[in-house]
Image (cartoon, coloured by chain):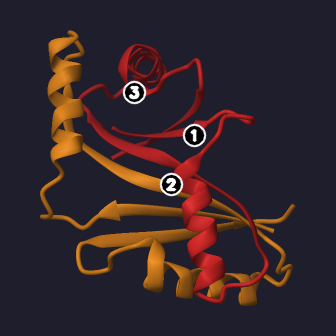
Chain colours: A orange, B red
């Protein structure tokens, strides 16, 4: 089973990387781009085949390592092989 | 309209950050985690409301700035406000 974890800054947390992307897009001539946020996308191959157990395990990984829950949100998507 | 761009390394491209996450998960006691890949997730607020025009514009942004197409793939998801 594959898991995809999206880690993004919570609203209100400053995102200088996203800001830099937004400014550069404007400098390149792309108009009409408002707020830009950059997050992380982590893709995991899991041996676990039960979706419930897989989600629980990936949640524990997020809380312990993948996301800093003080400033970041995470979302988990599971996909059968 | 909102656009989400997933930028990930192409298959075969070395991903040291993903490797480090995989090793750390194993050290933390998470078993059964195979390959781990880390990519980027870029969220854009667009003034454009036509999906076709929005996708075309975001594709141009990816080719010019958001992804290094020599070693990275990108996928675009559009979402109505």
Gap in angstroms between the C-alphas marked 3 and 2: 14 Å
Quadrant of the rendering where the N terminus of chain A is positioned: bottom right
**Residue positioned 61% across, 82% down in the render:** B27
Mark 3 secondary-structure assignment: helix
Query: Exactly how many numbered labels are in the figure?
Result: 3
Q: Is residue A74 shown above or below A34?
A: below
Q: Nearer the viewer, residue B58 or B35?
A: B35
Q: Nearer the viewer, residue A33 or B38?
A: B38
Q: Earlier in the sequence, mark 3 or mark 1?
A: 1
Q: Is residue A50 shown above or below B69?
A: below
Residues marked 1 and 2 touching at CB (< 8 Å)? yes
Q: Chain of mark 1?
A: B
Q: Chain of mark 2?
A: A
Mark 1 secondary-structure assignment: strand
Give the number of the disc on residue B53: none
| Residue farthest along the top direction in this orientation | A29
Q: Are marks 1 and 2 on the same chain?
A: no
Q: Chain of mark 3?
A: B
Q: Is residue B6 shown above or below B22?
A: above
Q: Nearer the viewer, residue B36 or A52?
A: B36
Mark 2 secondary-structure assignment: strand
Q: Nearer the viewer, residue A50 or A48?
A: A48
Give the number of the disc on residue A41: 2
Give the number of the disc on residue B8: 1
Residues marked 3 and 1 touching at CB (< 8 Å)? no
Q: Residues within 10 Å of mark 1 (few under 14, many from 20)?
A: many
Tell me residue A74's x, y (percent).
Answer: 43, 71
Gap in angstroms between the C-alphas marked 1 and 2: 8 Å
Q: Which residue is mark 3?
A: B66
Q: Are marks 3 and 1 on the same chain?
A: yes
């Amino acid at each position: 089973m594959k898991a995809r974890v999206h880690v993004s800054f919570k609203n209100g947390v400053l995102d200088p990387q996203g800001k830099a992307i937004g400014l550069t897009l404007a400098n390149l001539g792309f108009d009409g781009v408002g707020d830009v946020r950059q997050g992380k996308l982590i893709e995991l191959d899991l041996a676990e085949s039960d979706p419930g157990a897989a989600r629980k395990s990936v949640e524990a990984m997020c809380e312990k390592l993948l996301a800093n829950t003080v400033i970041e949100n995470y979302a988990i998507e599971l996909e059968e092989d």
